[in-house]
Amino acid sequence: MQADTLADLLGTLIRNECVNDGTPDSGHEHRSVDALAGFLGGPGRIFEPHPGRQSVLYRVAGRDRSAPRLMLMGHLDVVPADATGWAYDPFSGEIHDGFVWGRGAVDMLNITTTMAAVFKRYLTQEVPQPPGDLLFLAVADEEAGAKLGAHYLTEHHWDELACEYVLNEVAYPALSVSEITAYPVNVGEKGPFWRTLASSGTPGHGSQPYGADNALVPLARAMAGLAEAPSPVVISDEWRTFVDGLGLPDATAAAWLDPEQIDQVIEDLAAESMGLARYVHACTHLTVSPNLMEAGIKANVVPETGRAEVDFRALPGQDGSTVDGHLAKVLGADRDRIRIDPIMDHEASSSPAKGPLWDAIVDSFESLAGSRRVVPTLTPVTTDLRFFRDRGVVGYGVGWYDDRIEFPEFLAMFHGRNERVSVESLHRTYELLDRTVESFFKRIS
């Protein structure tokens, strides 16, 4: 597959502006479902639980109906982007200095693009029929909890989606620590435990605040406390495996694995790389991000109600009771004034770093990058893989990038400004996925 063909498809998906703002009428993934039909030469099986919110499934049947099935899955929606602060229009899909720029370039339209290109080789019979089924699924609504995407599909159409292995996101670039380069592969993810905090008070005139029952005040204290309070630490098995794979000096590795030292490790890292420090913190702590607060109607009216939303992400070994316990501790005396409601609850999930798909990934890195230092990695973000892992499916996220953007900068582009991916990285990831699929099918035949 030519690199410019990949760049063209990615540019098209970016320009389709499948922006998901969390409302059912946003997304418009039908635009990119149509684009994929043009690229693949025909329509697939379309699912549309809400007008315009389309997902599409393609399948190449394998020779052996009893053989394991492999799915390539990417999402089509992206988060909103304000052009302020971007070097180029976030929905232009333009190429500048060898990079394709735009919202979704790394989250995750780049991977969706390369997966479509790999799948096309099997769909057009450019390569022989595989022993097991190969599926390509492009889904809606990943960025808003997947109620109109993967969650809906696995609940209502599992008979059509059923498989044993999935490749999805997050596809990380190489990570170099202590002059050793490792290739991270996502094997697990934290669990989202989002909460709404609501408060009530008594309306009054803002000119007389003394003793007022202001709904905003306890809510503001709660949000400030949640932002500042230390959060629980967990050194999970996934984190231990990741650190072991980095080849750190013994004393450094010991500090990274010590719950009593990890906060100092993070503080030291922040002085050199805030991006890496944030990642290490997220992979070792219950994370708490107070992201939305609203109250009142105008400046001179004491608010009668207030509402806030907090993004909690739990590690393996943590659950809803961890989140609720932390909330109770931080809120203290205000706990009786604030009602807490769940928005989303899903425990962390992971897949074992072993078996035919894992071995195929490692072999592919060795053949293309000349290294078998492939490191199982936990991602702090939430992906559609959780719905498949709940059904016993083994799932990973993997890609292969050039060295023009390093690990910390790459992480900062997710939902951030100046999101971009190099054309060379698109081609590399295509090669890696193509080699991985080929190697997987050889292993199961």
Image (tube, rainbow, N blue to C red):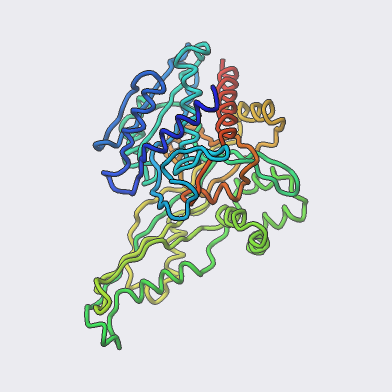
Residue found at x 36% / y 34%: 154
- Quarter containing the N terminus: top right
- Quarter containing the C terminus: top right
Residue found at x 64% / y 27%: 364
Q: Position of residue 86 (x, y in %)?
A: 47, 51
- Asked if residue 70 lies left or right of residue 400, the reply is left
Decide which of 210, 358 is in the foreground and name it: 210
The image quadrant that residue 272 belongs to is bottom right
Q: Position of residue 162 (x, y in %)?
A: 40, 26
User: Quick check: 410 above or below 212?
Assistant: above
Give the tally of numbered discs. 0
- Asked if residue 440 lies left or right of residue 307, the reply is right
Residue found at x 41% / y 33%: 12
Decide which of 54, 154 is in the foreground and name it: 54
User: Quick check: 175 above or below 267?
Assistant: above
User: Quick check: 114 above or below 310?
Assistant: above
Q: Is residue 326 visible?
A: yes
Q: Position of residue 238 (x, y in %)?
A: 60, 45
- Asked if residue 86 lies left or right of residue 300, the reply is right
Decide which of 353, 224 is in the foreground and name it: 224
The image quadrant that residue 254 belongs to is bottom right
Q: Position of residue 98 (x, y in %)?
A: 57, 37
Decide which of 279, 196 is in the foreground and name it: 279
Q: Is residue 198 visible?
A: no
